[in-house]
Image: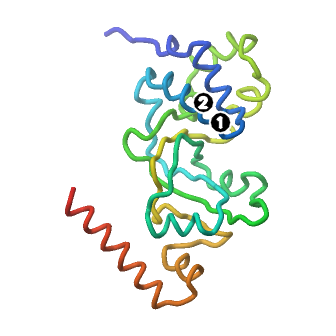
Amino acid sequence: MVTVSVSRYFTLELLQAINDWQRGGDHKQKLKRGGKLKKLAAALPEQYRTCSEICYRQEAHEKDRIWQLLADESLPETIAAWTTDLSIARNFKNGVPPDGLRGVIFSIVPPSKSVVINLIKIYGDPGFKSAIEQHKRGIDGFDDGIGRYGVTQREIVLELHKLGPETIHCYGGYASGRETLAQQFFGHKSVMEVLLVMMDGICQASRMDA
């Protein structure tokens, strides 16, 4: 039986893309870097593009945008960094959202085909570690990306087109199911119950159409 080494996948181009992604950047940079990472990671074996663990992500939104999530189940989400460590999500940017925004932590078990790259598995591969040592002098901005973060963020990069209310793990510092969130928004249980009935109806209709 012939064993194929996966180290051949860990090219300087891929390492640069991972490094650039981990460096962060503004919205435009993230879109560009996310697209490049997705393109290159697609050539990796499937083991580096799967995740069966719960993943978490903290974001800061205006209250109206969270309402959009609850009412429409259509909050757009593109390629983004998630983590399997809830404490890391909680402490993102010191755990304090900017003034006027509400902190939200989402949780999800990644759907099939949504994992762009599993950086935990990548960093755990001896071949990847060897590739870093081989190429690090040629990686632009190494000290601000791979050299700074490595696997410390327990990161899974996901591409999701929307997030439903069931993915909300925590809102404004409170553990929150749909009932808690709706009550915070409306303050009236009767309205909250209507919202929940509507959500359940939408979910049932979706299952019938599937």
Check the image and report above or below for 120 versus 208: above
Determine which residue is flagged by label 2: 32
**The N terminus: image quadrant:** top left
Q: Position of residue 126 (x, y in %)?
A: 58, 20
Check the image and report above or below for 189 versus 135: below
Point 64% across, 73% down: residue = 174
Find numbered disc 2 in the image and state the secondary structure of the residue it sits on. helix
- Left or right of residue 87: residue 4: left
Neighbor class of circle 2 (other Cα within 10 Å; few <14, some 14-19, many 20+) is few
Who is closer to the viewer here, 61 or 24?
61
Point 47% across, 84% down: residue = 192
Neighbor class of circle 1 (other Cα within 10 Å; few <14, some 14-19, many 20+) is few
- Left or right of residue 85: residue 165: left
Point 67% across, 27% down: residue = 20
Find numbered disc 1 in the image and state the secondary structure of the residue it sits on. helix
Q: Position of residue 39 (x, y in %)?
A: 49, 24
By what rule are the colours in the image chosen?
rainbow
Amino acid tagged 2: Lys
Determine which residue is flagged by label 1: 28
Amino acid tagged 1: Lys
Please identify the quarter of the rendering in which residue 204 is found: bottom left
Q: Are marks 2 and 1 in contact (CB under 8 Å)?
A: yes
Please identify the quarter of the rendering in which residue 122 is found: top right
Q: Position of residue 69 (x, y in %)?
A: 50, 64
**The C terminus: image quadrant:** bottom left
Q: Position of residue 160 (x, y in %)?
A: 47, 46
Point 52% across, 49% down: residue = 77
